[in-house]
Image: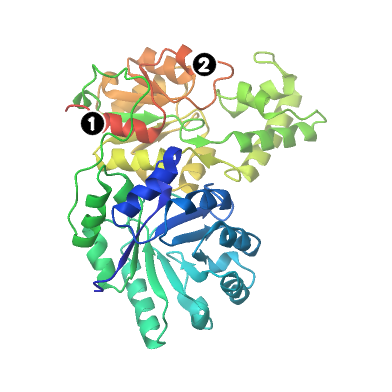
């Protein structure tokens, strides 16, 4: 194991409202590099930051900025990051038309060049470019989101890369990114890593110096519990022990599905010779399932009834278009995955209760890697009635073997609040989502929380 390994805190887990201060703080705490994740919502299902942000943080540190491009195409954006102050630029070989040319392009712009390998990407890409690679990054999670768990099968892959570097007498650094924690850092280093990328392992703790030291010596510091402050603390009378499970709505709560709903809706309207509508209209019409959405789209009203034959044709067209558009432009909300991970790690039982049909719900959860977090998934067609009727929540409680008062409902709409109130469950709302022109404060929820992650920190800090 190298005694001179480096630690690169990943800004993906930093506080973006004060990014310059965060960079200065982790460097002062002992960071050797700054890891800068760039995602384009095409190559990976997330959208982060670009060259302007890289340029903005450059004055805050003299340590190298290590840019990880999760974008397609690659070549167009390389000069922009080089100009913005990047020292290292790495990319995924699958995202480049000509890997050798892209490596040369990065070096020609004065940066060190790196190749990145996803968990299932073979190392064969290295066979003919070892002389042009300055860094090899092994992803020990699937890219796109922070806070994921380390994939143990990455260790043999790391060891294989170390053997290749040594055998070819390469100067390339071996970097590992994904789920790196104090309790696995030693095994990663033993496998041959030179650089550890750590996001939540650093930024989720109050004392960055202690967190970085923990990665170096393998000691876990106490979690940073005061990072999230809620704008309204309305759960003061609720003890954690009284909440035994948490149920989440899907659309507008976990995932922003609106762009795909709009695309499918306008494709359907074109099919039947109607004018397209904008996002504002669709946002007002959603919340009661796809069948109701189609009815509202073809009538242009909330409650009007369409011609039955026209409706059936429009519904069939919409379902076909939505099936094709599913998750193309859908985005997870910030903090959602980190919040689910924290709640599961804290022992919470989780359910997804949605008005979306199961045939669409399960593929969405699977695509975004969320299926394993939920003990129950109850779709809009699982039971005879759906929200705002309380049946789905009551069914969920029966399967968990708990009273409704022990199930916390998390949503974004009047349907979520009404279903929870009727069932006798506490309910919190998120400030984003789909509720037409209604202000979230008008929904009558027990609390308003800024994100799923913020909710997880609030719940886990309550007295047992």
Disc 2 from disc 1: Cα separation: 28 Å
Can residue 316 be seen from the camera position used here?
no
Q: Which mark is residue 133?
A: none
Q: How is the image coloured?
A: rainbow
Q: Nearer the viewer, residue 349 or 107?
A: 107
What quarter of the picture does the N terminus occupy?
Answer: bottom left
The local secondary structure at tag 2 comes to: loop
395 sits to left or right of 386: left
Extreme-right residue of the structure: 273
Rendered location of residue 435, percent (x, y): 54, 20
At 79% from the left and 34% from the top, the residue drawn is: 270
Q: Nearer the viewer, residue 287 or 44?
A: 44
213 sits to left or right of 134: left
Reply above or below: 353 against 150: above
Rendered location of residue 149, percent (x, y): 33, 53
Rendered location of residue 128, percent (x, y): 53, 83
**Residue 169: which quarter of the image?**
bottom left
How many numbered circles are shown? 2
Reply above or below: 286 against 14: above
> 10 Å neighbourhood of mark 1: few (<14), some, or many (≥20)?
few
At 34% from the left and 54% from the top, the residue drawn is: 27
Q: Which residue is mark 2?
A: 439
Rendered location of residue 112, percent (x, y): 50, 71
Q: Earlier in the sequence, mark 2 or mark 1?
A: 2
> 10 Å neighbourhood of mark 2: few (<14), some, or many (≥20)?
few
Q: Which mark is residue 461?
A: 1
At 80% from the left and 28% from the top, the residue drawn is: 275
Can residue 34 be seen from the camera position used here?
yes
The local secondary structure at tag 1 comes to: helix
Reply above or below: 118 against 285: below
What quarter of the picture does the C terminus occupy?
Answer: top left
The reply to whether discs 2 and 1 touch (Cβ–Cβ < 8 Å) is: no
């Amino acid at each position: 194991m190298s005694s001179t390994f480096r630690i690169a805190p990943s800004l993906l887990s930093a506080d973006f409202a004060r990014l310059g201060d965060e960079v200065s703080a982790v460097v002062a705490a002992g960071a050797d590099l700054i890891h800068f994740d760039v995602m384009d919502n095409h190559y990976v299902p997330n959208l982060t930051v670009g060259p302007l942000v890289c340029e903005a943080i450059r004055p805050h540190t003299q340590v190298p900025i290590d840019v990880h491009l999760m974008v397609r195409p690659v070549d167009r954006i390389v000069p922009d990051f080089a100009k913005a102050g990047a020292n290292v630029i790495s990319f995924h070989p699958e995202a480049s038309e000509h890997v050798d040319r892209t490596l040369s392009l990065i070096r020609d712009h004065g940066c060190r060049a790196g190749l990145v390998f996803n968990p299932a990407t073979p190392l064969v890409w290295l066979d003919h470019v070892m002389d042009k690679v300055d860094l090899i990054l092994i992803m020990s999670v699937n890219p796109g989101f922070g806070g994921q768990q380390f994939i143990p099968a990455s260790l043999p892959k790391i060891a294989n890369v170390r053997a290749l570097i040594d055998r070819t007498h390469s100067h390339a650094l071996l970097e590992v990114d994904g789920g790196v924690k104090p309790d696995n850092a030693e095994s990663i280093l033993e496998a041959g890593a030179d650089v550890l990328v750590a996001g939540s392992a650093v930024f989720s703790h109050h004392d960055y110096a202690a967190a970085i030291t923990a990665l170096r010596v393998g000691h876990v510091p106490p979690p940073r519990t005061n990072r999230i402050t809620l704008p309204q603390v309305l759960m003061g009378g609720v003890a954690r022990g009284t909440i035994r499970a948490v149920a989440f709505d899907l659309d507008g709560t976990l995932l922003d599905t609106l762009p795909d709903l709009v695309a499918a809706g306008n494709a359907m309207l074109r099919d039947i010779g109607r004018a397209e509508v904008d996002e504002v209209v669709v946002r007002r019409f959603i919340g009661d399932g796809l069948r109701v959405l189609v009815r509202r789209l073809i009538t242009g009203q909330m409650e009007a009834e369409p011609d039955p034959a026209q409706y059936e044709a429009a519904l069939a067209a919409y379902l076909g278009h939505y099936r094709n558009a599913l998750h193309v432009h859908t985005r997870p909300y910030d903090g959602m995955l980190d919040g689910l991970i924290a709640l599961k790690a804290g022992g919470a039982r989780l359910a997804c209760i949605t008005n979306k049909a199961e045939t669409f719900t399960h593929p969405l959860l699977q695509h975004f890697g969320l299926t394993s977090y939920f003990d129950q998934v109850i779709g809009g067609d699982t039971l005879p009635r759906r929200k705002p009727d309380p049946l789905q929540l009551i069914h969920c409680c029966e399967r968990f073997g708990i009273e409704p008062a022990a199930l916390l409902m998390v949503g974004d709409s009047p349907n979520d609040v009404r279903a929870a109130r009727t069932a006798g469950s506490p309910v919190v709302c998120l400030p984003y989502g789909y509720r037409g022109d209604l202000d979230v404060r008008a929904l009558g929820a027990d609390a308003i929380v800024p994100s799923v992650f913020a909710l997880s920190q609030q719940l886990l800090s309550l007295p047992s």
